Amino acid sequence: MNRCLSVLGLLTGLLLLLPLPVAADEDPDIQFGFYPSHNRDQLLILADEFCEYISKKAKVKVKPFVSVGYDDLVEEITANNVHFAWMSPLSFVQAEKKGNARVLLKSVRGSNPFYWGAVIVRKGRNIETLEDLKGKKMGWTYPSSTAGFIFTKAALHAEGINADTYFSENLFLGGYDELVKAVVESKVDAGACFANDIDGKRGAWSQYLSAADRRKIKPIFFTKPIPGDTISGSKIFINANPKVTNRILQVLLDMGEDEKGAQILTDLYQVDFLVDAENDDYESVREAALLFPDRY
């Protein structure tokens, strides 16, 4: 597919859904948001590198906003303080519901524009199935994380497991790096995280643990596929700045084909490239979120 035509088609569809453009600066500064999947200090460095790359390629000033929590990013894009953002699937549908978020692109890892939630345990703990976890200590990432909480909790619910009562404790541990570390160190008996395949080869444990430690981890449960994490945009900004938006999207779509760009995507969120996303792609996430109305 010609990616330039793909971007133009995406924008045409986008603008048909929005009010007529209002006057704006030709090249406004852009605030680009990042969700807190792992160590904040490292993410700040990677976000700077990403924004410098986009700034150079799109010929516009792009500044990073690294959120402390998932909810912060939802509020910032809703207020149009952030103009584009890497958002988890759940954060996108939460922001969409508030009225000012539009999904633009989704992440591809390997050849999959989706990933999975997984429950992982440390090997040698005599835990082989979900049944073995009854009365054990469970670790999650953030309350607004997709794989790290909502989608995986909903998948357990579908298996007849009420996580609130099934486990002796439910602990929120922060980023995926902290979650997998807690499982290795047996601070929790199991943890919810993302997986990039269902073979147990690639996931949060392979990304954030040393080679020696990742061999101590095994997944015992996978959810249904989750649509890839998004790059979403502020409708207000897109409507006022269609030309700048077009340039940004073209750079992002081409990024995986450029050696430096591809490395930045990998370092940032283990993404290989980005493709167009549709609103309907995230219906399964909306359905999972409805099970927990306090989060949606």
Image: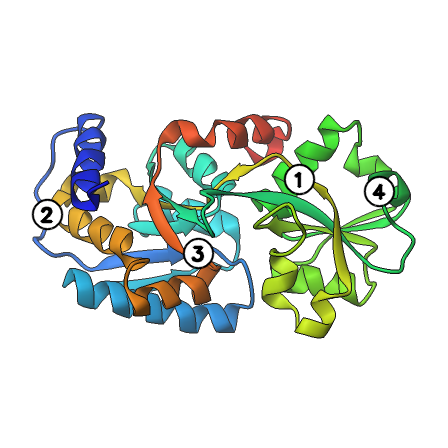
Residue at disc 4, secondary structure: loop
The tag on residue 271 is 3
Report the amino acid beneath label 3. Val
Q: Earlier in the sequence, mark 3 or mark 1?
A: 1
* Disc on res. 152: 1
Quadrant where the image shows the N terminus: top left
Which label was assigned to residue 24?
2
Who comes first in sequence, dot 4 or dot 3?
4
Please name which of the two marks, 3 or 1, marks the residue nearer to the observer.
3
Circle 4 residue? 129
Measure how far apart labels 4 and 3 are at the Cα level: 30 Å
Q: Nearer the viewer, residue 235 or 187?
A: 187
Q: Label 2, secondary structure: give it.
A: loop
Which amino acid type is shown beneath numbered disc 1?
Thr
Percent of width and height locating residue 81: 31, 51
Q: Residues at badges 4 and 3 in contact (C-beta under 8 Å)?
A: no
Q: Is residue 95 left or right of residue 58?
A: right
> What amino acid is at disc 2?
Ala
Q: Is residue 233 left or right of residue 142?
A: left
Q: Return the residue nearer the eye: 172 or 79.
A: 172
The x and y percentages for residue 167 are 85, 43
